[in-house]
Amino acid sequence: MTPLWTAQDAITATRGTMAGTSSADWQATGVSIDSRTLERGDLFVALTDVRDGHDFIAAALAKGAAAVLASYIPKDVAPDAPLVIVPDVLEALADLGTAARARTQARVIGVTGSVGKTSTKEMLRAAFGGQAKVHAAEASYNNHWGVPLTLARMPADTDLAVLEIGMNHPNEIAPLARMARPHIAIITTIAAAHLEAFENLAGIAAEKAAILDGLEQGGTAILPADLEVTPILTAKASLAGVRTVLFGNHAQADYRLTDVQVTEFATIARARHAGQDMLFKLATPGKHFAANALAVLAASDALGLDRAITTTDLGRWAPPAGRGTRETVLLDAIEGHSFGLIDDAFNANPTSTAAALDLLAACEPTHRVGRISTGRRIAILGDMLELGPTETALHAALASHPALAQITLVHCVGPRMQALHAALPKSKRGHWVATAAELLPKAPHLVDAGDIVLVKGSKGIMVSLVVDVLRKLGQPSPSHQGTE
């Protein structure tokens, strides 16, 4: 196996020194920041976050780490262990990322936006994997350590790299974009997220547009066409002197959605570009997914890839866990009775929650199979965090979303969601609890065969615990049961 990092490459990149008399001929096949998931041959990076990574160096070496990037030698580590000593481990990780970006000929796509970053990143991975060697960020590795870690893990012979770049506060995106140096930058949308740190949507748009600060000369900015703040994005692109491509529903969009049909298990979309009609399908429901997929098709064209192959491979994409994943939970293995579960518990803001409610409304429950004869659409909604001083009004406003007309009951989790609970019509008002833990004993009694259940909330409110309980209601399929 070709090493990802040799000792000399890592030392040169980080300007570090080998500890004591330890050997400097090691080779690493991966990079890890977590000793629990570290694989033999990884370079362990001892970051300090909630815990000090130096506390886990001995464990990492015991599991077979090729070497360790650290700022000192802990007492429980031998003085001749393969440690690269640097003044600051996070800065050294950034140096590794910068060096990895410099040594590759890969074309790089950077993705940011208030909603849909991870889903779009995974769409790009799925859609382009059949035509190129693609390297993409894991999970939502999009912050000050996630971006350099993704770069540091990138093999030198990568064809296409897909990086997700996020933020919580001003001035976070530009330095990450300059490190990533994308050839294509995609901004999915601008929405009311992280308003605690920004005065308004214009401030969020300006920060997201900072991804263009790192765009390579001759690069392409793929931007949403339908937003009030679109002029902020296009002005930034013009200032940067890059090619601008607009996507969305707007009549002036270069890639314009003309029709989106959402069925229970699929999305069928039509679009128009350069005078030609386009048809593409996704094997998952969601109108918002169609817009993200259109940006992927724009990126495919910008890269000169085969659009037919891209469209076919895109059709096989499925959303990552916690981001709108549709599941069937089998309640009765003999009768085959089940309920549908939509796991969207990873993150939430008003825009993504509205999209999730639209998705729930489009799903069709099954009638006359459960204790309650009519199948129901049920939403379990957790707090939307980091919305700033208008958070109460933003939560309450969900009660007027048109999709609520199709939804039977809404259960609310968290102090902020109390505003929605109070604003709901009594007929739709389910439980309100302050924490997800309080809902867990009730969860098995909230669903019935034939129901469709959406669980949505910001990660910090931990409604994913409710998802776990609902999943555990399932029984194994008869086809998977043993026989005597």
Image (cartoon, grey):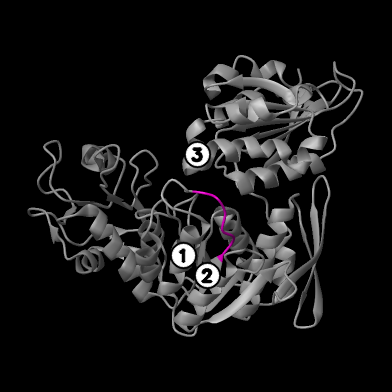
Q: Residue at x 37, y 64 (%)?
A: 176
As measured in the structure, the alpha-carbon distance from the residue carrying label 1 to the one carrying label 3 is 21 Å
Comes first in the chain, label 1 or label 3: 1
Q: Is residue 298 magenta?
A: no
Residue 123 in the image, given as x and y percentages of width and height: 63, 59
Quickly name the residue at label 3: 385
**For residue 323, above or below residue 95:** above
Classify mark 2: residues with Cα within 10 Å, few (<14), some (14-19) or many (20+): some
Left of 461 or right of it: where is 168? left
Classify mark 3: residues with Cα within 10 Å, few (<14), some (14-19) or many (20+): many
Q: Range of the magenta residues?
A: 187-193
**For residue 164, above or below residue 414:** below
For the question of whether residue 3 can be seen, the reply is no
Residue 149 in the image, given as x and y percentages of width and height: 37, 57
Q: Residue at x 50, y 62 (%)?
A: 205
**Marks 1 and 2 close (CB-CB < 8 Å):** yes
Q: Is residue 190 magenta?
A: yes
Q: Amino acid at mark 1?
A: Ala
The C terminus sits in image quarter: top right
Left of 183 or right of it: where is 174? left
Q: Which one is in front in this view, the residue at disc 3 or the one at disc 2?
A: 2
Left of 438 or right of it: where is 476? right
Q: Amino acid at mark 2?
A: Ile
Q: Secondary structure at mark 2?
A: helix
Quickly name the residue at label 2: 232
Quarter of the image where one finds residue 373: top right
Q: Residue at x 64, y 43 (%)?
A: 353
As measured in the structure, the alpha-carbon distance from the residue carrying label 1 to the one carrying label 2 is 7 Å
Quickly name the residue at label 1: 206
Comes first in the chain, label 3 or label 2: 2
The N terminus sits in image quarter: bottom left
